[in-house]
Image (cartoon, coloured by chain):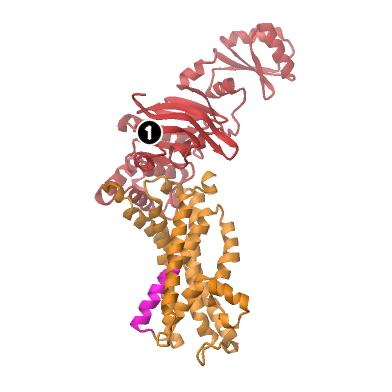
């Protein structure tokens, strides 16, 4: 537990009868970009609310910097920056007014506040827009101001809830670059939730949440290596019987997922030939690809990522 | 509370207050709606009912335009208070409030900043309307003006607090509008703002007597007719002050609770 900055233990949260989080535990080291990956409704938003001190958990504990998040809320709040999924900027105020307001909430003022605002706006390329009303900014620009807002009080930990939702791919990459820069240059520990594989791939480590449970915790690379080699998917008219036959014939596990048969196998390209020869006429199409995080998710949970739009 | 924590009170409250000001004056339609609507009501009802309105307690030649003046003033305070507290719901829905809630700011500062913001706006709008008093032949001396300031401030504070308590629990502005029509407007109607309790049926008279806003309306009339004898003036002022403090305490209590809106 030595260099763990965040320690989550046996965290459980209920909304009435419904269990949103079920005994989730993990640790985040200082200076890493840690991702919480999961489908919508998987529990990551609840976890985010608990980490950001918005909601107290039903059971279990969260410690940041060795401080209990529930017991010493204000101390935690001073040291974390939070960027919510919903825009928190006041659209009727200018960029500068929004940031000043935020600074005042953290008891920053005067020249110190002004120089922090100037530095952050320059860093995010927004210096020339500081007098503009937020409602005149584009989505990507607003997200940059949100980020500046969350960083104004120099937090040691930055929490971001679905930071790339609603952003186009170019702005998403830009955002990931900013986050890496923060980690490398400022030593900020970053924890973000996402349901986008591309974003999850850029995290140092990932926790995968499904139906309130932690199903995996590792680097994206090692998670993908869990899958033996390649992922093969077979399009056919009758997936169920074919999956059973494949399973028997090659003594492997073949799953049916949304009308196609999925197989995980080393040397996929060679296996395809065997497969097509073994079941002539039954296979409409075959594809093979290197495992993605989505494959990891399917491998671990047996179902696809629900609510994944992109 | 250490020093560094103590400072997390004044500046946050002031900045929340300041935001209310900026937002209000950037949204001109809100200014117009909260001030012009009551004035139109006042003129239409005042001239319309005119001299057909008679009340035993009013002096001779006291038409409806004059009777309804204090009621209109309270309507302006109420409308401004409602408009400024509706923004609590918008702030929650749009996400602004979340960022405030995770800042190291106590709920006391948040509630105070917000309510003082609405109070200031209502108070200023009320002042603008008060300028019209001489048109009715009401001449306000320094003492009566000071009294009116205090009463207006307390009523504004109480109504903004009341609006805050309601708005904090709401997840949609539609819900707030329903409460406004079913509760806040009747609260105003039954405060002596529109008709005096003397002519009303006994049960309605009782409702008006337990309505804390009635005392505020009466206190305003006492300020407007400063030279007449007002034996109960201090009682009216005290009830209005208790109303204001009570609403603040209730707002604080409401703000400690996590509401459904936070979980969406």
Q: Position of residue A247 (x, y in %)?
A: 67, 10
Q: What is the chief secondary structure element of the magenta stretch?
A: helix
The image quadrant that residue B209 belongs to is bottom right
From this view, report whether residue B137 is shown above or below residue A174. Answer: below
From the viewer's side, name the closer residue of A159 and A53: A53
Name the residue at 52% across, 83% down.
B67
From this view, report whether residue B129 is shown above or below residue A243. Answer: below
Magenta residues? B140-157
Name the residue at 60% across, 88% down.
B52
From the viewer's side, name the closer residue of B234 and A169: B234
The chain letter of the red chain reads A
The image quadrant that residue A28 belongs to is top left
The chain letter of the orange chain reads B
Mark 1 burial class by Cα count in 10 Å: few <14, some 14-19, many 20+:
many
- Residue B153 lies in the magenta-colored region: yes
Q: Residue furthest left?
A: A111
Q: Is residue A4 visible?
A: yes
From this view, report whether residue B153 is shown above or below residue A192. Answer: below
Q: Is residue B27 visible?
A: no
Q: Report the quarter where the N terminus of chain A lies.
A: top left
Is residue A291 toward the left or the right of residue B231 in the image?
right
From the viewer's side, name the closer residue of A38 and B59: B59
What is the chain identity of the residue bearing mark 1?
A: A
Q: Position of residue A174 (x, y in %)?
A: 42, 35
Q: Position of residue A123 (x, y in %)?
A: 33, 40
Q: List the residue tagged with mark 1.
A: A64
**Helix, strand or loop for disc 1:** strand
Name the residue at 40% across, 60% down.
B22
Q: Position of residue A110 (x, y in %)?
A: 26, 52
């Amino acid at each position: 537990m030595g260099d763990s900055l965040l320690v989550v233990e046996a965290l459980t949260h209920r909304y009435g009868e419904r269990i949103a989080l079920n005994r989730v535990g993990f640790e985040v080291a200082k200076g890493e970009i840690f991702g919480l990956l999961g489908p919508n409704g998987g529990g990551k938003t609840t976890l985010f609310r608990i980490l950001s001190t918005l909601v107290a958990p039903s059971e279990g504990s969260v410690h940041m910097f060795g401080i209990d998040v529930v017991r010493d809320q204000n101390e935690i709040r001073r040291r974390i920056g939070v960027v919510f999924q919903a825009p928190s900027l006041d659209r009727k105020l200018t960029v500068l007014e929004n940031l000043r307001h935020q600074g005042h909430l953290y008891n920053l003022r005067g020249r110190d506040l002004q120089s922090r605002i100037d530095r952050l706006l320059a860093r995010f390329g927004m210096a020339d827009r500081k007098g503009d009303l937020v409602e005149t900014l584009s989505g990507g620009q607003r997200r940059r101001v949100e980020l500046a807002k969350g960083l104004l009080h120099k937090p040691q930990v930055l929490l971001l809830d679905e930071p790339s939702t609603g952003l186009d791919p170019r702005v998403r990459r830009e955002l990931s670059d900013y986050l890496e820069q923060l980690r490398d240059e400022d030593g900020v520990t970053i924890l973000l939730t996402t349901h986008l594989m591309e974003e999850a791939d850029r995290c140092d480590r990932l926790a995968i949440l499904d139906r309130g449970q932690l199903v995996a915790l590792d680097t994206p690379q090692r998670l993908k290596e869990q899958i033996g080699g390649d992922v093969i998917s077979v399009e056919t008219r009758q997936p169920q019987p074919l999956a059973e036959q494949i399973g028997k014939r090659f003594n492997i596990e073949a799953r049916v997922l949304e009308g196609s048969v999925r197989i995980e196998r080393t040397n996929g390209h060679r296996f395809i030939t065997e497969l097509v020869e073994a079941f002539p006429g039954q296979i409409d199409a075959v594809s093979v690809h290197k495992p993605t995080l989505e494959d990891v998710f399917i491998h671990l949970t047996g179902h696809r990522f629900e609510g994944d739009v992109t | 509370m250490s020093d560094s924590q103590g400072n997390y009170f004044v500046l946050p409250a002031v900045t929340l207050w300041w935001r209310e000001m900026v937002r209000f004056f950037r949204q001109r339609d809100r200014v117009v709606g909260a001030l012009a609507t009551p004035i139109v009501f006042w003129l239409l009802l005042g001239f319309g009912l005119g001299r057909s309105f008679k009340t035993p307690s009013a002096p001779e030649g006291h038409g409806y335009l004059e009777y309804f003046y204090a009621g209109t003033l309270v309507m302006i305070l109420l409308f401004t208070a409602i408009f400024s507290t509706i923004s609590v719901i918008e702030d929650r829905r749009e996400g602004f409030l979340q960022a405030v809630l995770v800042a190291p700011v106590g709920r006391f500062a948040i509630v105070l900043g917000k309510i003082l913001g609405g109070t200031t706006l209502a108070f200023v709008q009320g002042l603008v309307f008060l300028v019209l008093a001489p048109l009715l032949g009401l001449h306000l001396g320094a003492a009566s003006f000071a009294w009116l300031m205090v009463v207006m401030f307390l009523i504004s504070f109480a109504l903004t607090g009341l609006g805050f308590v309601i708005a904090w629990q709401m997840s949609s502005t539609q819900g707030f509008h329903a409460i406004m029509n079913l509760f806040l407007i009747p609260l105003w109607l039954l405060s002596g703002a529109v008709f005096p309790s003397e002519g009303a049926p006994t049960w309605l008279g009782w409702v008006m007597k337990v309505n804390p806003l009635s005392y505020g309306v009466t206190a305003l009339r006492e300020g407007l007719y400063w030279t007449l004898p007002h034996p109960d003036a201090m009682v009216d002022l005290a009830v209005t002050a208790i109303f204001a403090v009570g609403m603040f305490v209730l707002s604080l209590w409401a703000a400690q609770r996590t509401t459904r809106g936070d979980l969406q």
